[in-house]
Amino acid sequence: MDETLANGVRYDARHAAAYSAKIRALIPGYELLHQLSTELLLATLPASARVLVAGSGTGEELLRYAVAAPSWQLSGIEPSADMNALALARCEEAGLLGRVQLLPGKVGEQPLPAASFDAATSLLVLHFLPDDGSKAAYLQTLAAALRPGGVLLLADLGGERGEAGFEQLFEAWYQQQCRSQTRRDRVELDFAHLRQHVYPLSAARRAALLQQAGLVPGPEYWRAFGLAALLARKA
């Protein structure tokens, strides 16, 4: 198996370098998701908070939070060495290495200090895990790393495949991409990937998994087609 390929997504250097533009084009409201996530954390956390970013990629969230809150300590966990290398270079260029820690590996593979983070974020990550125990283990690992009362920001594709409302929104997203992108073949590849390698959850199932992990589901703060973000809190 190609080691740069996981769940249908390539994580080699070339794809890592193109990721920032790619994800902004694919996800409607991507920039707003990050803006609102930053504002919500600023309104919720103390000045000296510790924040864990799951799936930290090329450092997008880490840089935003580090600039917005100069006293926060930040940790990012990311399985792609090429993504981590880009994130490291960006943090070094911004003079942030003293406040940012980059951890290689997937959530659950890398030991995390228990009950030590004020917040964790998981933006557009959980839906890549099948609901065969993998989602539950992922959420339980993040919850274990949070202090009591700590918050989790969770954004993913939601709904049930085959259900009329889900399929209507998914089709609208597909049509939006066909109209906005210049390469129809790439849109087809993207949506074939979304159909094959993304595992959305109904709201009820997501709430059950959060509660199983010791997390209390809270309000949604962003939505775009079937994608949504919510705040959860550790009991």
Image (cartoon, grey):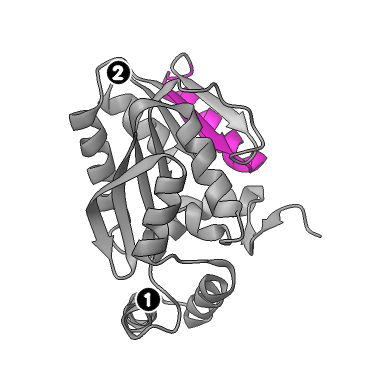
Residue located 56% across and 61% down the image: 131
Please tell me the numbered disc located at residue 197.
Answer: none
In three-dimensional space, the C-alpha distance between marks 2 and 1, rounded to whole angstroms, equals 37 Å
Q: Is residue 135 visible?
A: yes
Q: Is 87 covered by the magenta stretch?
A: yes
165 vs 214: above or below: below
Q: Is 59 covered by the magenta stretch?
A: no
Q: Estimate the x, y position of residue 85 in percent, counting from the top left.
A: 60, 34
Query: Which of the 4 image quadrants contains residue 63?
Result: top left
Residue located 25% across and 51% down the image: 32
Seen from the viewer's position, the closer of residues 147 and 223 is 147
Residue underneath mark 1: 177
Left or right of 83 on screen, residue 97 = left
Residue located 46% across and 47% down the image: 212
| For the residues bearing labels 2 and 1, Cβ distance under 8 angstroms | no
Seen from the viewer's position, the closer of residues 124 and 82 is 124
**Residue flagged by tag 2: what amino acid is it?**
Pro
175 vs 198: above or below: below
